[in-house]
Image (cartoon, rainbow, N blue to C red):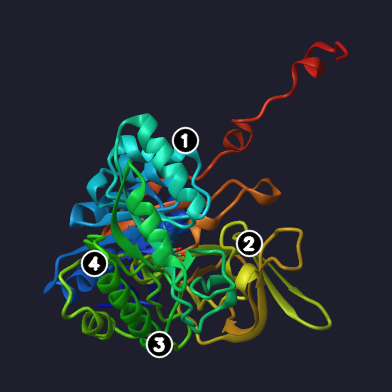
């Protein structure tokens, strides 16, 4: 099914016209298709139905509690990387027994909160973290289930900023030395060492790195078991890519085949942490053209969404397809730029795009992952609204921020208010 399609010449998400949403709540806004989330999650889960598995949605990719609640209702767990993401997952009703916690810089406070919530597992990223986990578990009186994140030194063949499984990356513990750390962790009183974890990168469009990493992990599990460390979980992380601009990432069955082949003789519960693969193509960012502008070098479409709303083009030079909400054959080579005072503020550069006039709408496609969740208030721009569409209905799952939201946590120091010097 096409979750975003033209019906009577105007783009719809499922059965809801984007023009209708824009006229009712203004722009810019993120719009997500509930059916797209549901289908992607179910396809992913079905590909692994022959094995015990837990699918922990990567909260960082799209962290709205409306989305998390929907995925939780389908049976998803959560892959979190901060206390804030734990809070969101719990608020959304995700079962703590399906929450895994990665990240190189967990604080003691965050670890305590996760222990108290009773999460499934910490994915420890360093030797020092093992000690801190043990210490906090001891002082809280709650045992910590632990996996160690292994850096298998497999090239994911993706953008360097989202490659994580190479020796030069900050993540995990090198596969060469990790056995020592497992043995050490097994001696720590408050830890139950039950898992191995890896996540080699994001937006992978080839299947072979997954297969390669899975083989390394399977052989590690066998060695650890031979050493008496009873590994119950293999967490393969996320990373399965999507189509932004003609890429042909593996489909769910190809991905599953590569992983399952590597673990076929192992009795282990598989954990996956897909983010982008479930959320990326479920969402679009809808923005209105404010001005058009010609310089000697370029034609600009100045729109009301900017790099604070969608950072990926500025940050990674990422490509997002930009489509007119009202169908047109008129085309123009242009830069689609936002109002922010940075030359780096663009959604597309030198793009042959639909020639949408002032007041017309564009839909920036494939923006469901690392879109809203990476947004900021830069240039004191209130964050966009988010809506979830189901069939012919839409639900506001995050209202547009107001100016008062911008300054809510701030205050003018008392000495300025009273006029007294300090
Ligand atoms: C540990 C971990 N798991 C899962 C993910 C999700 O990755 P993706 O959105 O590519 O599936 C990430 C992304 O950075 C990650 O760091």
User: Is 415 on the left or on the right of 226, as rendered?
Assistant: right
**Residue that numbered label 4 is attached to:** 225
- Graded by Cα atoms within 10 Å as few (under 14), some (14 to 19) or many (20 or more), the crowding at tag 4 reads few
- As measured in the structure, the alpha-carbon distance from the residue carrying label 4 to the one carrying label 2 is 48 Å
Residue 356 drawn at (x, y percent): 57, 75
- As measured in the structure, the alpha-carbon distance from the residue carrying label 1 to the one carrying label 2 is 32 Å
**Earlier residue among tags 1 and 2:** 1
Q: Closer to the observer: label 4 or label 2?
A: 4
Tell me the element at label 3.
loop
**Earlier residue among tags 2 and 3:** 3
- As measured in the structure, the alpha-carbon distance from the residue carrying label 4 to the one carrying label 3 is 30 Å
- As measured in the structure, the alpha-carbon distance from the residue carrying label 2 to the one carrying label 3 is 29 Å
**Residue that numbered label 1 is attached to:** 109
Determine the residue positioned at 50% across, 78% down.
Answer: 321
Q: Which mark is residue 307?
A: 2
Closest to the observer, 366 or 221: 221
Q: Closer to the observer: label 4 or label 1?
A: 4
Assign the C terminus to one quadrant of the image.
top right
**Residue that numbered label 3 is attached to:** 206
Q: Closer to the observer: label 2 or label 3?
A: 3
User: Is 386 on the left or on the right of 71, as rendered?
Assistant: right
Residue 113 drawn at (x, y percent): 39, 36
Closest to the observer, 227 or 311: 227
- As measured in the structure, the alpha-carbon distance from the residue carrying label 3 to the one carrying label 1 is 38 Å
């Amino acid at each position: 099914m096409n979750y975003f399609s033209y019906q009577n010449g105007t783009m719809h998400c499922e059965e809801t016209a984007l023009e209708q949403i824009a006229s009712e709540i203004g722009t810019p806004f993120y719009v997500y298709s509930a059916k797209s989330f549901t289908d992607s999650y179910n396809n992913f889960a079905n590909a692994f139905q022959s094995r015990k598995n837990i699918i922990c949605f990567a909260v960082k990719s799209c962290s709205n509690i409306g989305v998390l609640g929907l995925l939780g209702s389908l049976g998803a767990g959560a892959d979190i990387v901060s206390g804030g993401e734990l809070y969101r997952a719990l608020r959304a009703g995700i079962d703590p027994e399906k929450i895994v916690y990665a990240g190189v810089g967990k604080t003691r406070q965050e670890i305590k909160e996760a222990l108290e919530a009773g999460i499934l597992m910490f994915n420890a990223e360093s030797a020092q973290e093992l000690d801190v986990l043990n210490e906090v578990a001891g002082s809280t009186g709650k045992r910590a289930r632990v996996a160690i994140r292994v850096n298998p030194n497999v090239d994911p063949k993706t953008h360097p900023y989202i490659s994580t499984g190479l020796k030069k990356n900050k993540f995990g513990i090198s596969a060469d030395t990790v056995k020592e750390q497992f043995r050490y962790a097994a001696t720590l009183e408050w830890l139950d060492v039950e898992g191995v974890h890896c996540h080699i990168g994001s937006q992978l469009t080839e299947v072979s790195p997954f297969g390669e990493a899975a083989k390394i992990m399977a052989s590690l599990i066998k060695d650890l078991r031979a050493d008496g460390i009873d590994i119950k979980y293999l967490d393969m992380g996320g990373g399965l890519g999507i189509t932004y601009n003609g890429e042909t990432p593996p489909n769910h069955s190809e991905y599953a085949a590569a992983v399952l082949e590597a673990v076929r003789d192992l009795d282990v519960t598989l954990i996956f942490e897909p983010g982008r693969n479930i959320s990326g193509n479920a969402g679009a960012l809808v923005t209105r053209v404010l001005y058009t502008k010609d310089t000697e070098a370029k034609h600009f479409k100045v729109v009301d969404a900017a790099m604070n709303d969608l950072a990926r083009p500025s940050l990674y030079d990422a490509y997002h397809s930009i489509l007119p909400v009202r169908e047109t054959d008129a085309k123009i080579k242009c830069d689609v730029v936002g109002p922010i005072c940075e030359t780096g503020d663009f959604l597309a550069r030198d793009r042959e795009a639909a020639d949408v006039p002032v007041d017309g709408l564009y839909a920036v496609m494939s923006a469901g992952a690392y879109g809203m969740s990476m947004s900021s208030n830069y240039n004191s721009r209130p964050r966009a609204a988010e809506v979830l569409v189901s069939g012919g209905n839409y639900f506001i799952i995050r209202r547009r921020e107001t100016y008062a939201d911008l300054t809510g946590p701030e205050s003018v120091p008392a000495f300025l208010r009273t006029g007294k010097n300090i």
